[in-house]
Amino acid sequence: MPEWIIWVMIPWFLFMIWFLATGGYFMFRKFMKGMPKEDGKSELDWQEHYIEKTRHLWTEEQRRLLDELVQPVPQLFRDTAKRTIAGKIGELAVREDADRMTQDLIVRGYILATPKRDHKWLIETLERKEVDLSPYRQLLQ
């Protein structure tokens, strides 16, 4: 076997290890979210419960706001991110016994459901829409 083939195989082998490890990491995270907790329901079950319970509260304008907020998420993961955020927003709405979905609920749910690195996009979007950020400063820190 020519020596150059070995030098091609080494990076390919390292890439495949990295690729499989990354996929395994995300599969393991999904598996752990699907595991039942003490109450018998998993995080995914609760997320689905809150989405279904608050589905009637959403208007088209609020759905567009949520779509706009998840724009920086890669297309492949956007639906999953949207469901996770909508689940957290629904949880807030149920806990506060909201009779309709508000921009305040959507922004707070987004902040609580996303990592800090995504808050920069939220701030830029809300500033562009001329929304007062002062009620959310504590959550953004």
Image (tube, helix red, strand yellow):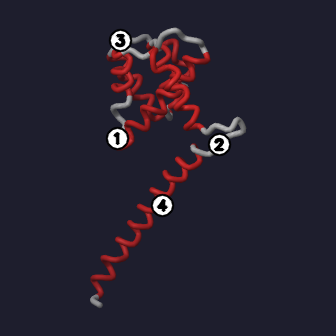
Q: Quadrant of the N terminus?
A: bottom left
**Residue appearing at x 51%, y 23% in the figure:** 89
For the residues labelled 2 and 4, say whether their Cβ atoms are less than 8 Å apart.
no
Foreground mark, 2 or 1? 2
Secondary element type, mark 2: loop
For the residues labelled 2 and 1, say whether their Cβ atoms are less than 8 Å apart.
no
For the residues labelled 3 and 1, say whether their Cβ atoms are less than 8 Å apart.
no
**Residue appearing at x 39%, y 72% in the figure:** 13
Secondary element type, mark 4: helix
Q: Which residue is mark 4?
A: 21
Q: Which residue is mark 1?
A: 74
**Residue appearing at x 57%, y 43% in the figure:** 33
Within-10-Å neighbours for mark 2: few <14, some 14–19, many 20+: few
Q: From mark 3 to mark 1, how far is it between C-alphas? A: 26 Å
Q: From mark 2 to mark 4, how far is it between C-alphas? A: 25 Å
Residue type marked 1:
Pro
Q: Which residue is mark 3?
A: 130
For the residues labelled 1 and 4, say whether their Cβ atoms are less than 8 Å apart.
no
Within-10-Å neighbours for mark 1: few <14, some 14–19, many 20+: few
